[in-house]
Image (cartoon, rainbow, N blue to C red):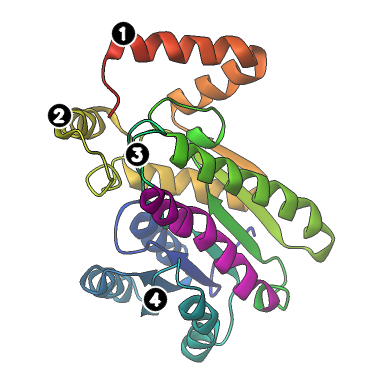
Amino acid sequence: MRDFRDRVAVVTGAASGIGRALSLALARRGANVALVDLNAAGLADVEREIAGLGRKASSHVADVADRARMAELPDEVLGAHGRVSLLVNNAGVSVGGTFEEQSLADLDWIVGINFWGVVHGCKFFLPHLRKEAGAHIVNLSSMFGLVGFPGQSSYCATKFAVRGLSESLWVELRDAGIGVTSVHPGGIRTDIVRTSRISNAEVKARTIELFDRYAMLPEDAAERILRGVERNRMRVVICREARVADWLKRLAPSGSQRLLAAIARRAGPIS
């Protein structure tokens, strides 16, 4: 998708973070945007900002894990915009702690949003994307979709799943002219850590401080993602730490995991 002008993009998790930044970046490129999130007030703010840029936006309050609600969503978007050209499955959450410490309820929650949310978006919007020349799907994975990280087993599981789904779709939809991009960010300054389920308050506070100090701005991440879409990239890896992790995993699959184990021991509690 080389030109976003007058295209219609659906963005989940659009009320904040990368989703908000992507929605505004798309509007600046001339796209109209269907904004999807559970945060109605946040959606209204983004919708007003997009209107200020001279583009059309619609707000859709939805839980991406809710299959029935997601099945309704394409008709709402088509009613507001008449077409769908780009789907960005961005909504995501995190659970911190060892696998033994995480409850099955935690696993249901994170899988429902991070994996099933992507599946729902792809499944229900794909018939409409097929009608658009040069349509594209963007699925947000993570650097934790490239390497297994201690204290993030459930998050890694969902992000590896998103990566696998995206790579399979890339092959399946290639002849249909639909691009698929899997995005693997490192640390991005969003609310995902603040909303994460981490039982250890000290660890959570330390992680928030690190993200606030060192993480990339979501606006910078959004620009890199859209450049990847413009170039029809299968994979976009964002942030130095994500690129380092990717190359270490390629060069030394076992050694990279041993290195992570050593770092985890030195860093102390992970939950």
Range shown magenta: 104-127
Q: From what the image shows, is residue 184 above or below residue 120?
A: above
Q: Earlier in the sequence, mark 4 or mark 2?
A: 4
Q: Amino acid at mark 1?
A: Arg
Q: Earlier in the sequence, mark 1 or mark 4?
A: 4
| Residue nearer the viewer, 235 or 30 | 235
**Mark 4, residue position:** 55
Q: Residue furthest bottom?
A: 79
Disc 2 versus disc 3: nearer the observer: 2
**Mark 2, residue position:** 202
Q: Earlier in the sequence, mark 4 or mark 3?
A: 4
Identify the element where label 3 is drawn.
Answer: loop
**Mark 1, residue position:** 266
**Mark 3, residue position:** 188
| Residue nearer the viewer, 84 or 172 | 172
Quadrant assignment for the C terminus? top left
Q: Are marks 4 and 3 in contact (CB under 8 Å)?
A: no
Q: Earlier in the sequence, mark 2 or mark 3?
A: 3
Mark 4 → mark 3, Cα distance in angstroms: 26 Å
Query: Which quarter of the figure has residue 13?
Result: bottom left
- Which residue is found at the position 27% from the left and 27% from the top? 214
Mark 4 → mark 2, Cα distance in angstroms: 43 Å
Q: Amino acid at mark 2?
A: Glu
Q: Is residue 34 left or right of residue 159?
A: left
Per the rendering, the mark at residue 206 is: none
Q: Residues within 10 Å of mark 1 (few under 14, many from 20)?
A: few
Identify the element where label 1 is drawn.
Answer: helix
